[in-house]
Amino acid sequence: MADELISEASNPALRVSKPRRFPSTRRALSDINRVAASTGNDPLLDSLLLRLHTETACRRGGALSLRPRDLDIEQCLIRLREKGETLRWQPVSPKLIVHLQAHSDRRGDGDPDGQLLRYTNGSPITRRRYDHLWTRLGRHLPWVATQQISTHWLRHTTLTWVDCNFCYAVAREYAGHTNGHGDTGQPRLTSARTSPKSPPPSQL
């Protein structure tokens, strides 16, 4: 029809019944961010954690090892140190880098090599903060508990978006992989919660 080889009336495909659409299983990251920002004893910290992982696709270990000296304010980069002794500079939005610096200024002890992410009393956070965060989110959003959403899910969602909108090679670099294994081990990651038309994770 587009090439005018047949007319609309002659197109048999238009007479084929479309299959019934099943209810969407998509869930918005905005719901997770909203609950994190409005519940708990430290919503500023939890919101910062979610944005950090959504934008960078970093692992929990990468976030916990982040130091004040790992922030490059001018170029909007953070230095991530993750498993396998990998080291890379990851791009972030200007808004995130400003919030990370402000968090460090308010809660840090002035040591550029100290842990950046801290509680209001200045104590460094641990992996338990993530456990408490997702447990609380599951109480407010039952689908989070049912589908066992976790920090790694954020990583996979972001890498899927990068793969769909750019290419597999870019996604592998974004994931910080030095070999063929890991979250981007197969081209074209699939996810029920992302699509090429979705907004970039940094805007969610």
Image: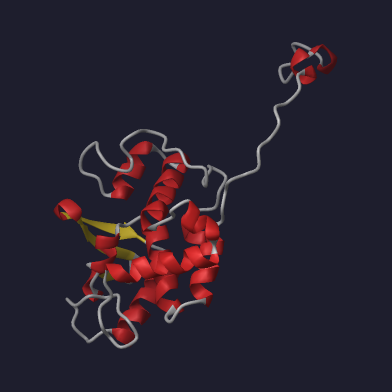
Q: Is residue 108 above or below residue 19?
A: below
Residue at point 42% right, 51% down?
158
Q: Quadrant of residue 151?
A: bottom left
Residue at point 35% right, 74% down?
100
Q: Position of residue 130 (x, y in %)?
A: 35, 67
Q: Is residue 7 above or below residue 113?
A: above
Q: Position of residue 17 (x, y in %)?
A: 76, 22
Q: Quadrant of residue 186?
A: top left
Q: Quadrant of residue 63?
A: bottom left
Residue at point 28% right, 75% down?
125
User: Which of 190/200 is in front?
Assistant: 190
Q: Is residue 198 above or below residue 68?
A: above
Q: Position of residue 144 (x, y in %)?
A: 49, 57
Residue at the left extreme, as displayed: 85
Instruction: Tell me: 141 left or right of 24.
Output: left
Tag count in the figure? 0
Q: Position of residue 152 (x, y in %)?
A: 36, 53
Residue at point 43% right, 53% down?
148
User: Which of 86/143 is in front?
Assistant: 143
**Residue 94 is at least partly visible in this image:** no
